[in-house]
Amino acid sequence: MSDDTGEKKELLFKETSVKKIYYFMDSSKNINQLSKEEYKNSDKIVHYPIGFKGGAKYHNILKFTYVGFRKKLPVGIYKVANYGYGFTRPLKFFAKYLDEVLKIKELIIEKDIKPFYDKKKKVIGLNQNILSKMKNVLESLNGKQIKETEQLVTTELHSIFPQEIKIKIADYVSDSIFLSVERWNNSIKEFSDKDKHAIQELFDKLSLTGNFFSTNSLLKTKEIIDTEYIKSTYIEFSNLMKAKDTPGLEKKWQMFLKEKNWIFSYIFSHPIIFYKDEAYVGGKGIENKNGKFTDFLVKNKLTNNVSFLEIKTQKTRLLENKAYRGTDVFSISSELSGAVNQVLNQRDNLQKDFYQKQYNSDQEFEVFNSSCIVLIGSVSDLSIPQRHCFELYRNNSRDVEILTFDELMEKIKLFQDLIKVKKK
């Protein structure tokens, strides 16, 4: 087999009943060597990585075996002989680790294989998900973090082969935090749960270390964190306000308020703490047994007196669309009257069986003419005559305070503006 044109080619060299054997040829570099085998009776392809000047591409890795891909090979590997086969550039450090540290001779990549590592035969088996994850992890590193790559690869492989591959305790690489922060675009959503936990632990440790942070720097950090947190809360609230009216919308609001329960302090006029969500108020106790329940039960931090919060959605109607009399008198909606009666009924149930529920509860609470709030609808959806009727009804409601979602959003916005003014 020869080629006088100097062109790079992979040519069929031999065909047997079992497989097709290919050679790669580059006459300008005198390369003429085995490059690929395709098996006829099984979904299996073998690549023999080729060095830039011919010969083996790696010191130890001799071949890549692919099984189950139907000729659509996975990400992270070169699929044509002109590039020499083997790993693509983003995975070069992974290749180096397998080749020079583990001294692997054969790499088997099977679509859904259970990973294995034969240390004696120097064979390792990986699936496409592992390869894809490794590629994504290594691509996230910038050029100034090369020292960390071996530790990172070791950590990833240790998670797959905990007995065979041990983790080395890594030394901190100076300026790593600075480089990460320098390229951060200041979006909290970029952080994973692991990132947040690590930052929290680091901050806690350093805060206990004398003279690491000055008082001013700690206060400044707290201001920044507070501002960003309120901002992210407001954005999340705004996005929920735009949500369509679906059966699951009320549950989304419940989850949001449970997570951001500091907002209750801006709903109730007294200092409160989050007590219980979906608390049963008509059964044997408030531990969710045999009774009616309220969306949120909050407690006065100083007196232990509980308050009731019943929530609907920002799309819930406040008034009927059709005027009751003339053009400017509107009836309240069945949803609003139902919510008011519902929260009053919940309070009544808790008051009637107070002593039994308190006895069965592991926390102290009181029911001294407890306040009730209904969070429902949006004032901005009402016409001027409707707003007039709504305010007449709301201000005449003696036992239940009615608050709308857009009013609550405005409260959060005012709080955000107040923090900005303080920073200046």
Image (spheres, grey):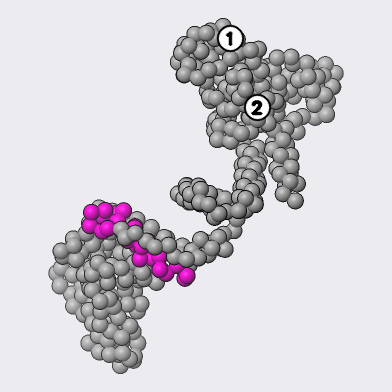
Tell me which corner region of the image, top left, top right, bottom left or bottom right, holds residue 39. Answer: bottom left
Residue 270, image x, y percentages: 68, 25
For residue 281, side relative to residue 16 (left or right): right
The amino acid pointed to by label 2 is Pro
Residue 1, image x, y percentages: 22, 87
Q: Residue furthest top?
A: 352
Q: Residues within 10 Å of mark 2 (few under 14, many from 20)?
A: few
Tell me which corner region of the image, top left, top right, bottom left or bottom right, holds residue 234. Answer: top right
Looking at the image, which is closer to me, 298 or 222?
222
Q: Which residues are magenta?
A: 143-166
The amino acid pointed to by label 1 is Gln
**Residue denoted by label 2:** 271
For residue 333, side relative to residue 325 (left or right): left
In the rendered view, tell whether residue 54 sits above or below residue 417: below
Q: Residues within 10 Å of mark 1 (few under 14, many from 20)?
A: some
Residue 108, image x, y percentages: 24, 63
**Residue denoted by label 1:** 351
Mark 1 vs mark 2, CA separation in Å = 22 Å
Looking at the image, which is closer to me, 358 or 7?
358
Q: Is residue 98 magenta?
A: no
Q: Residue at x 44, y 65 (%)?
A: 173
Q: Residue furthest front?
A: 210
Looking at the image, which is closer to me, 318 or 44?
318
Q: Residue at x 66, y 22 (%)?
A: 374
Nearer the camera: disc 1 or disc 2: 2
Judged from the image, the secondary structure of the residue bearing numbered disc 1 is helix
Q: Residue at x 27, y 76 (%)?
A: 58
Judged from the image, the secondary structure of the residue bearing numbered disc 2 is loop
